[in-house]
Amino acid sequence: MFNRIIDDIVDETPDQKAALEKYQDFYKEYELFKNREAKDSYNWRALRNTVDKYDIPYAFFEEQLEGQRRGIGLTGFSTEEELEEYSRLVAGSVGKMLLPVLSSSYDRKMERACEELGIAMQYTNIKRYFRRRESTIPSLSPGRPYERVWH
């Protein structure tokens, strides 16, 4: 829920100012969640249950939020390193969020492997995007910022 909502805010809100406002509203809700003051909604309750049950560090969610913030109004990357850093934040964070669910004990090496898995998933999404663009299927998100680096 968390990742899908924040990703949709950034990707599906065409106006940069509106996207930033929606992002800021969501970030405020996240801060309330983090401080255990979230409004009573199914999504926040479900996330609270999962975070508490698996002891998922808030830092992983904050990496996601930072990546999404950087994505607002993003028009491209100049280098593969910039693309990788963006992917680390928006997708590597997802891989790291999964780690406590998949393993009750882990170390930095496992955390890094899950982060790399998330980056690989992001690159797979990028590849799929280009495949859609080149086929007769219309792209779901035209003008993605990674076009300049990989196309």
Image (cartoon, rainbow, N blue to C red):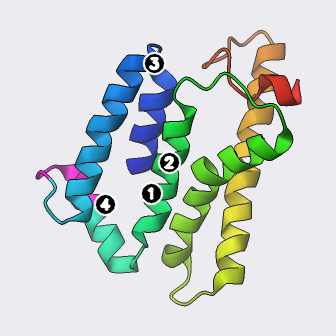
Residue 127 seen in the figure: yes
Query: Would you say 36 lies left or right of 89 here?
Result: left
Locate the C terminus by quadrant: top right
**Please, what secondary structure does the residue beneath circle 3 have?**
helix
| Mark 1–mark 4 distance (CA, rounded to whole Å) | 14 Å
Q: Badge 4 is on which residue?
A: 47
Amino acid type, residue under disc 3 in the picture = Gln
Q: Quadrant of residue 76?
A: top right
Q: CA distance from mark 2 to mark 1?
A: 6 Å
Q: Which residue appears at 84% of the width and 41% of the height? A: 80
What residue sits right under mark 2 in the picture?
66
- Residue at 51% across, 40% down: 68
Q: Earlier in the sequence, mark 1 or mark 4?
A: 4
**Quadrant position of residue 145:** top right
Residue where numbered disc 3 is placed: 16
Give the answer, above or below, for where 116 lies relative to 26.
Answer: below
For residue 42, above or below residue 21: below
The x and y percentages for residue 56 are 42, 73
Q: Quadrant of residue 34?
A: bottom left
Cβ atoms under marks 2 and 1 closer than 8 Å: yes
CB under 8 Å between discs 4 and 2:
no
- Residue type marked 4: Leu
Label 4: element kind: helix
Residue that protrudes farthest toward the right in the picture: 151
Q: Secondary structure at mark 1?
A: helix
Q: Amino acid at mark 1?
A: Glu
State the residue position of label 1. Answer: 62
Label 2, secondary structure: give it. Answer: helix
What crowding class fits label 3: few (fewer than 14 Cα within 10 Å), some (14-19), or many (20 or more)?
some
* Residue range of the region highlighted in magenta in the rendering: 39-47
